[in-house]
Structures are given as C-alpha cells and as structure tokens.
Amino acid sequence: MTKHVTHWIGGKPWTGAAERHGEIYDPATGAVTGTVDFASGAVANDAVAAAYQRELAELVSSEHGKVASDAAGEVARGLEVVEFACGLGHLLKGAYSENVSTGVDVYSIRQPLGVVVGITPFNFPAMVPMWMFPIAIACGNTFVLKPSEKDPSASMLLARLLADAGLPDGVFNVVQGDKEAVDALLTHPDVHAASFVGSTPIARYVYRTGTAAGKRIQALGGAKNHMVVLPDADLDLAADAAVSAGFGSAGERCMAVSVLVAVGPVGDELVAKIGERVARLQVGPGTDERSEMGPLVTRVHRDRVASYLDSGVAEGAVLAVDGRRHQVIGGGGDGFWLGPSVLDHVTPAMSCYRDEIFGPVLSVVRAGSYDDALRMVSENPYGNGVAIFTNDGGAARRFVAEVEVGMVGVNVPIPVPMAYYSFGGWKSSLFGDTHIYGTEGVHFYTRGKAVTSRWLDPSHGGVNLGFPVNK
Ligand code: NAD
C-alpha cells in the first residue's frame, strides 16, 4: 500500500482533493512509496487564514470589549513569557564551590514551593495569567488560577490548550469566583504563594491576608501613570504617543498614560494636537475591523469613569474633549461606551488626578519646570509606570535616576518590560518584595537551599565540639 500525505490546516488533516501531487520515493530501492498533495494558491491561503485566526484573542475581545488587534497584542505579550519560561532551566542552576574546607564542598539549589495561586484582573484576561503560570509551572510548581469574574472564558481556553499540549492533569487548575474563592485560596494550608494583579485596595488586602496566613505574596496594584513632556520634545510624536497610550484598550491598562505633564510653555499646543488626533479615533465594537477603541467593561465602570468628567469640571478643570459626544461605529446600542476624553488644566488636588480612573480620560497638568514635574510624579502615591519625552539625553538620564517609579520609558509611553526583565511598580502599585515574571518571577516561585557536603574517608574521624570553621 502506498501512503498519502496531505496538508494540516486548522487543527486537522485537509480533506479536499488536490489537483496536483508529487511522488515520495524510498531512496534505497527507488520504489515510489506514496504521494504528497501539492497546495494550490487557494489552499495556501486557507492555511494562512487558519494560522491567523486567534481563538484566544477573539475570546478576550468578546468579553473584555477591546479591539481584535489589541487582544492579539495581549496574547503575543503573554506568549513572550511562555517562551522565556521554556528556557528558564538556565536560571535554576545553582552555584558550586569546591573544597571550601578540606574535603568539603558547598552548592546551592532552587526548589519549587508546591501549590501556588494566581488571582488576576479583568483587563488582561490572557496576558496577566501568562505572566504567572508559565514560570510557576516551569519552576516545578502546580498552579490554581482565579481569573476575573468579568471575563472568565480565556482562562478555560488556556486550560484546554495546556491539556492539549500534554500538561499532566492537576498541574494547572482554574477556580472561578470572587472574594470567597480568593479568601479560601489565600488561607488554604497547602497553598504556599500567591501572585495577585488588580486594584490597589484589593492588592493591599490580599498582601495582608496572605502574609498573615504565612504565604509568600506578590500583589500588584493600580496606577496613575504620568507622561512628562519637556519643552524640547517633538510635540507631534508626543501627541501620537499620548493618544496611543491614553486611549488604547479604552484606557483600561495598568500602564495606560492617564496624566500628561506639559512642562513649560508646550501645554496649549500639545492639547490642540491631541484634540485633532482624538477626533479621528474610530470607536466601535471589537469585532469591527475599523474600530481602534472598544467599550468599557461594565455599565457601572463606564458610569464611574464618565463621572470624572463632571467632577473634574466642578473642581476647576477644562473639558477639552468630551468623549460622551464621540460617535460610535454602528451607533453603540446599549453598550458601555465612552469616547476618548481630555481634561485640561488639572491640578494634583482634583479627584480626577488623585484617583485611578481606569478609562479613556486623559488629564493634562501644567508644570513650570522639570523639577516641578519630577516632584509631582514622585509624590504620587502610585509608582507603576512613567514616561519622559525629550530630545535631551542628559535630562532623560537624570529623570531615570531620580524618579520614584518602578518602570520608566524614555520616549516610550508604555514601558512594559520584555519577558526576561521583571514587571512591577513601586509604592502603592506593588505590595511584596519581588516583581512579576523574568528573573524575579523565578525567585518568587522557588526557594533556595544551600548544601554543605563531605564524603567521609577514614582521615576525617574524631569528635570536635568547636564551632565549624574552615581550615
Ligand atoms: P480588582 O481588584 O477589582 O479585581 C482583581 C481580582 O481580585 C479579581 O480576580 C477579583 O475577582 C478579585 N477581587 C475583587 N474584589 C475582591 C475582594 N474584595 N477580595 C478578594 N478578591 C477580590 O481589579 P479589576 O477591576 O479586575 O482590574 C483593574 C485593576 O487592576 C486596576 O486598578 C489596574 O490598575 C489593576 N491592574 C494592575 C496591573 C499591574 O501590573 N500593576 C495590571 C493589570 C491591572
């Protein structure tokens, strides 16, 4: 019998009838052992289309609301952590010192903790879990994920993909729910550590509850990310960056720019340039290819975000762009829409500056000097991300050294570190000692052991009650 080899498209062998075939030979005998289908242009296109379909990204978009390209980006950034985890054996290597005393060697190993837990927010239902479980599992732990109840489906698809890839049963588990599930996991005697990502009040609560129960905890909280624009910056590039980072994912990113600090005289020009760009933004459903920005996650959240437009004006800000008037592709229906909005002349005393709004509202603050801007950023209770826009290398370098924030971008508005660095803010943006993923993630999910060994031979005999010193 001769064999027949065909294409593999979309998870299964192709069942069509090929117009052209090639022959497969056994080179040892010269006999034809089978045929292989040759793809037409149409079949090749089908394969590309299947490869392009990203089920995980579609699921994220359908429950979170973010547009398809943004959801695909989230999955891609999560996969970077998976790739990092695939090679992390290198980071589990211990040290070895030979003959620290006569016949005595010392070495260190890192061991897994056991059962570890991840509690994740709604805004990255695929990526944030992927910040955690690939590293936890590659370090030898088992994992229980408690995803956000607002967009729970991505976690189930991740579980299925891991099972399909051959992960043994019980290594990755998903528990859906809210506070009751979180409390049970945080206090369970067999749970050794928990990674949390979410808002600051809950992060603080999780840190306190978990550490009181003797667990190792890293709890990443909310943010108020500033983008400082110095007078020498290219204002067109700065305006592009502010709009991209302020309104991407409808501002529901922990690294979104929510405060623009215009230093010196550039405020009016910047606000005008931002206004032009915002007016052209396409707001619509994540399923519509034209959409650049989707709806907010719930009605309650949309209403809370929109309330800052009124409170900002009441407290003295100028509503430069009112997102409530922005047209939505398809009309919007009963969806949770709020277009991109800009509050100008905001001051640090206003609630729109103090609170994490977590929506498409950009506050513009004027600062008289570099020092004023630096002080404002460093005095903010949050310390997740910050960006400086300038062409002055010396000023940027000084800012990097001086600012009290965990992740800094120089002419990069959303400085999310690559998978082999670690992600984490300072102050009220992170409770715990280690940042998430990267090398610090490996340390979080393992504990060290130092071993001192001697292989006895007859020359080592004799009792000695003195303190062990190295000779
Ligand atoms: P959230 O704090 O409401 O929820 C996060 C998780 O905690 C969810 O799994 C939720 O079910 C659980 N939870 C909610 N209330 C709880 C309670 N009382 N007790 C125990 N568990 C509880 O956050 P969210 O609204 O889902 O996400 C948005 C927030 O997450 C924003 O503040 C954003 O800045 C933050 N965030 C931070 C980072 C970061 O890296 N620092 C990343 C993404 C999101």
Image: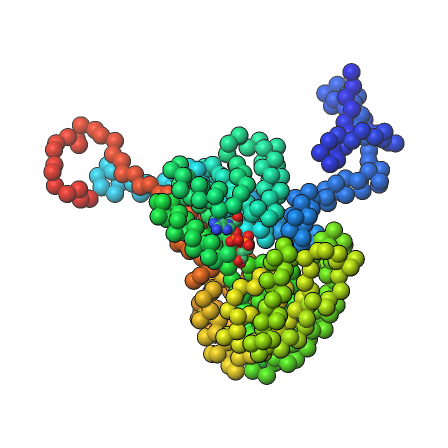
- Residue at x 72% of width, y 68% of height: 325
Q: How many marks?
A: 0
Looking at the picture, does residue 85 appear above or below residue 381?
Answer: above
Is 178 or 226 nearer to us in this picture?
A: 178
In this picture, residue 155 sits left or right of residue 197: right
Residue at 38%, 52% (x, y): give it. Answer: 208
Q: Is residue 462 left or right of residue 348?
A: left
Q: How is the image coloured?
A: rainbow
Locate the C terminus and report the quarter of the image it occupies: top left
Residue 95 visible in image: no
Q: Residue at coordinates 58% horizontally, 73% vertically from top-left?
A: 312
x, y percentage for residue 400?
Answer: 48, 68
Q: Residue at x 72, y 73 (%)?
A: 276
Residue 86: image x %, image y %? 53, 41
Q: Quadrant of residue 466?
A: top left
Where is residue 401 drawn, in percent x and y?
44, 69
